[in-house]
Image (cartoon, rainbow, N blue to C red):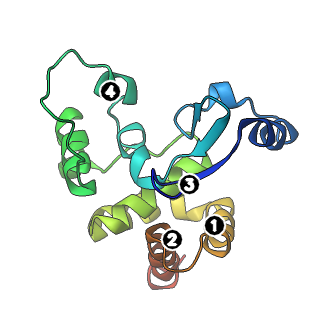
Amino acid sequence: GKISGGFTLEFDAARKIAQGLGVHLEQCETLVEVKGDKARLLPVSERTQHLFGKGTQAATSGGRKSKKPKQKTLFQELDEAEAAEAGWTEIKGPPPGSTVLDRVHQAMILFAANRGELLKRFLVEDGVGQDSRFWKLADNLNKLYPPGTEERRWVEGVLARKKGLGL
């Protein structure tokens, strides 16, 4: 359901789709959450820690006590990731993700967090925007995300930067 965010499918259906793509759901915990007989595609915002340098495991299974787990904003997560990586903003921005999807999601998060200069650096200087697969995937995601969702707005924002950056 939409309550927890992301898109949910029966585990078996998700497993078959993933298998058809040569992917094992069990190895995609930074992309898909499996709970019982359901598989949930994690929303882009929930992938921030994974994509920007802070390990998701360390963040979730840390030994620190908290009274009530408070939902962090995208800005807080991005700031924490920057701090954990010794302020990558000053130097060069986040290291590009290992997959094209990771890189598209990183760009979407930078756009969502109003980090225009970092987004420009990421796409131009780091060369992420030179990869035609990046733009093809961003375009396809734009068609797949339902209208009115934050992911749709973010990917549209990234796509809108393409021409302005001469890519």
Residue ID at (18%, 50%): 90
- Do tag 3 and tag 2 residues touch (Cβ < 8 Å)? no
Amino acid type for the residue under numbered disc 1:
Leu
| Residue receiving disc 2 | 155
Q: Within 10 angstroms of label 3, few (less than 14), some, or many (20 or more) residues?
A: few
Q: Earlier in the sequence, mark 3 or mark 2?
A: 3
Q: Is residue 91 left or right of residue 119?
A: left
Residue found 27% across the figure and 69% down from its top: 114
Query: Image quarter for residue 26?
Result: top right
Judged from the image, the secondary structure of the residue bearing numbered disc 3 is: loop
Task: Give the label, 3 or 2, closer to the camera.
Answer: 3
The residue closer to the viewer here, 120 or 101, is 101
Quadrant where the C terminus is found in the figure? bottom right
The residue indicated by pointer 1 is: 141
Give the crowd class for mark 4: few <14, some 14-19, many >=20 residues within 10 Å: few
C-alpha separation, residue under disc 2 versus residue under disc 4: 27 Å
Q: Is residue 12 above or below residue 79?
A: above
Q: Position of residue 29 (x, y in %)?
A: 55, 31
Residue at 52% x, 73% y: name it.
Answer: 152
Nearest to viewer (mark 3 / mark 1): 3
Which quadrant would residue 32 be assigned to in this image? top right
Q: Are marks 2 and 1 in contact (CB under 8 Å)?
A: yes
* Among numbered discs 1 and 4, the one appearing first in the sequence: 4
Mark 3 = which residue? Answer: 1
Three-letter residue code for mark 2: Val
C-alpha separation, residue under disc 2 versus residue under disc 1: 7 Å
The residue at which mark 4 appears reads as 60
Q: Secondary structure under badge 2?
A: helix
